[in-house]
Amino acid sequence: MDRQLIENKERNILILHIAFAALCVVILMVPLGLPIGIRLFALVVIYNLAIPGIGLWLKHNDWVDLWLFVFPFSLFMVLPDWFLCSGLGVLVYPEDSFIKIGPIPVYMAFMWTIPLILIILAGKQVQKHISQRTAYICVATVSLLIFGVAEQTMWALPSWSSQNVMIINHWAVYLVIPEMLLGLSAYIAYEKIKYKTILKKAMTAFLIMLLFWFNLVFFYFFVEKVLLELQIL
């Protein structure tokens, strides 16, 4: 691939995310008189239109291909979130008079695209410029950073928050490893199925969601029922 084209793609994706971050600050921080659920919904819809839309416009087909993987995954993630809310009772969303899928605000069905695109793109850049092994370390680190920042900030909007579990600085301890593994598994899976059919992407995304769900249950039990009851933590 032409080096200039690669550099343009890298610059364009950086500009897009800087612009989106600025938009988030305006919409979330400026008092607009709108419920937080509506503002978050507007932001995630804008992002999910911008990535494939601008990708098609600029002929950055890899943006579109990546979005076609993370978008169905984001939709599937309503299921483990629903389980955490209604099954375990450890996740709670505020009543903000906005549309919900069960106990889950509808914006959550679109929100997971944002961290996963950032995580996978970070891994691809490190893989291209350094090495595959370093890319894995980068993906794990970026996953912890992104999800950690989200846990530290989203409760204050307010959006989601954890309850009835061990929490350190608003981050439930049982979530740390599953969220790191989520970033790694999504990155590795996408490397295997990029440019494959939409059906294969959706099936892979569903399997990654199930793996994340399993990790949630396992580490919830291990942290909350084993380590805490044995007074190891």
Image (cartoon, rainbow, N blue to C red):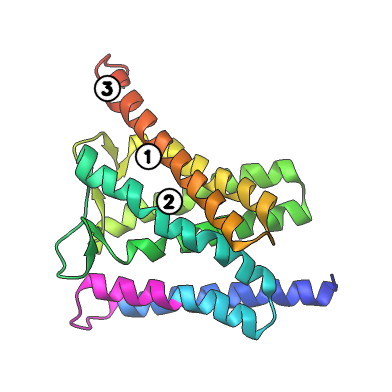
Is the residue under label 3 in contact with that under label 2 (CB below 8 Å)?
A: no
Q: Does 34 lie within the magenta span?
A: yes
Q: Residue at x 22, y 83 (%)?
A: 32
Q: Position of residue 122 (x, y in %)?
A: 62, 57
Read off the residue under disc 2. Answer: 147
The C terminus appears in which quarter of the rendering? top left
Q: Does 8 lie within the magenta span?
A: no
Callout 1: 10 Å neighbours few (<14), some, many (20+)?
A: many
Q: Position of residue 125 (x, y in %)?
A: 70, 58
The N terminus appears in which quarter of the rendering? bottom right
Query: Relative to 68, does residue 76 appear above or below in the rendering?
Result: above
Residue range (magenta):
28-46
Amino acid type of the residue that numbered disc 1 sits on in the rendered structure: Leu
Amino acid type of the residue that numbered disc 2 sits on in the rendered structure: Phe
Amino acid type of the residue that numbered disc 3 sits on in the rendered structure: Lys
Is the residue under label 1 in contact with that under label 2 (CB below 8 Å)?
A: yes
**Left or right of 79 on screen, residue 95:** left
Q: Quadrant of residue 132?
A: top right
Mark on residue 33?
none
Query: Relative to 68, does residue 119 appear above or below in the rendering?
Result: above
Q: State which tag comes first along the sequence, 2 or 3.
A: 2
Which element is circle 1 on? helix
Read off the residue under disc 3. Answer: 225
Q: Position of residue 115 (x, y in %)?
A: 48, 58
Foreground pick, 44 / 140: 44
Number of residue marks: 3
Q: State which tag comes first along the sequence, 2 or 1.
A: 2
